Amino acid sequence: MPRISVAHGLAAALALVPTLAHAVEPPAPAERKQLVIISFDGAHDNKLWEKSLEMGKRTGAHFTYFLSCTFLMTRAEGGKAYQAPGQKAGRSNVGFAQSREEIQDRVHHIWQAHLEGHDIGSHACGHFDGKGWSQADWQQEFTAFHAALANAWKAGGIESEEPEGWADFAAEDIKGFRAPYLSLSDGLLPALKKDGFTYDASLVTKGPGWPSNADGIPRFGLPLIPEGPQQRRVIGMDYNLFIRHSMGVENRKDSAVFEARTIEAYRKAFEAQYQGNRIPLQLGFHFVEMNGGAYWRALDRFLTETCGKRDVACVSYAEALPLIANQKKADRSAF
């Protein structure tokens, strides 16, 4: 199993420091939809591609998949050429695809997700901490990502099956980014702008918040949400709950308990916004079913009971952007 980012756990502690100021919002107009934005980091395990795509179809939700590009290359064929800034060639913190057949399944899932209206974003390549990276370093990693995506069908040995439109998709449609470890540097924002990204989802906020605007780029933050008997806040992400519940050690025995705590936290976080100003609720996940799948089961239950509401939209980050802009415009015109 690829190693999951320990810095998502570290981010939970760092997130106690405010990263985004929240403006006081007027009461939500009755017609404002409550947005729910679900994202997945890594996007590697093909079984979880299948599971998430089925979940999306069944609940009507659209997701954002932040893809790590080393899962589009094997170590032997392509992985040796990949070199992250400040790293030796052929290194990756999350590994590589184990076979061409694995890549074949993955590219079919990526294309299916794209055709079904989901959003494919970038999680860079080898999941390295970029806190010290310059603009040039980030652009080096972005170039590697785009090259891996453009070359993915060839890397899987099925170049002849590459669908019409893939080249344009790889070149033009990856507009969102989430930094590995949620770790930023001063070089990131100018690199995102130069590379044509239209949003960043690498921040952490004290609670659900509107995206900030940093030099023309909307920046989203995963919120701290109350959880557990003491209602202590935790980043709304499965890995942080995994650390909270079992200190990052797999515990299947108590999986049902962890699921119950998680679905309660999701419901309360949702209701606070749904009955209030209807600020978008963002929740993050990985392509790993931790603690016996507790967090994916809680997600499935939450989406099943939530996305069908008339005034709720379970959308990707790409879909949320114009909806938020329209909502803000409507709010201004109402006062």
Image (cartoon, rainbow, N blue to C red):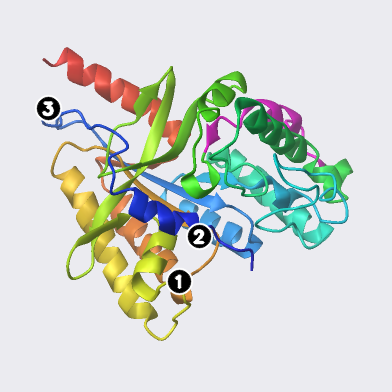
Quadrant position of the N terminus in the picture: bottom right
At numbered mark 1, what does the secondary structure look like: helix, strand or loop? loop
Of 70 and 184, the residue lying toward us: 184
Q: Which mark is residue 26?
A: 3
Cα gap from disc 3 to disc 2, whole angstroms = 38 Å
Q: Amino acid at mark 3?
A: Pro
- Is 169 magenta? The answer is yes
- Where does the image place residue 50, in percent across and percent down from the top left? 59, 59
Q: Quadrant of residue 190?
A: top right
The residue under label 2 is which amino acid type? Answer: Val
What residue did someone put label 2 on? 6
Mark 3: secondary structure: loop
Q: Is residue 159 above or below residue 91?
A: above
State the residue in front, 94 or 158: 94
Give the image quarter of residue 143: top right
Which residue is drawn at the image coordinates 28% and 49% (left, top)? 16
Marked residue nearer the N-terminal end (3 or 2):
2
For disc 3, the neighbor class at 10 Å (few under 14, some 14 to 19, many from 20) is few
- Measure the alpha-carbon separation of dots 1 and 3: 40 Å
Disc nearer the start of the sequence (1/3): 3
Quadrant where the C terminus is found in the figure: top left
Residue 184 location (% of width, % of height): 49, 37
- Which residue reaches farthest bottom? 253
The span picked out in magenta is 162-177
Query: Where is 244 relative to 21, above or below?
Result: below
Mark toward the start of the polypeptide (1 vs 2):
2
Q: Tell me the residue that label 1 is attached to.
A: 248
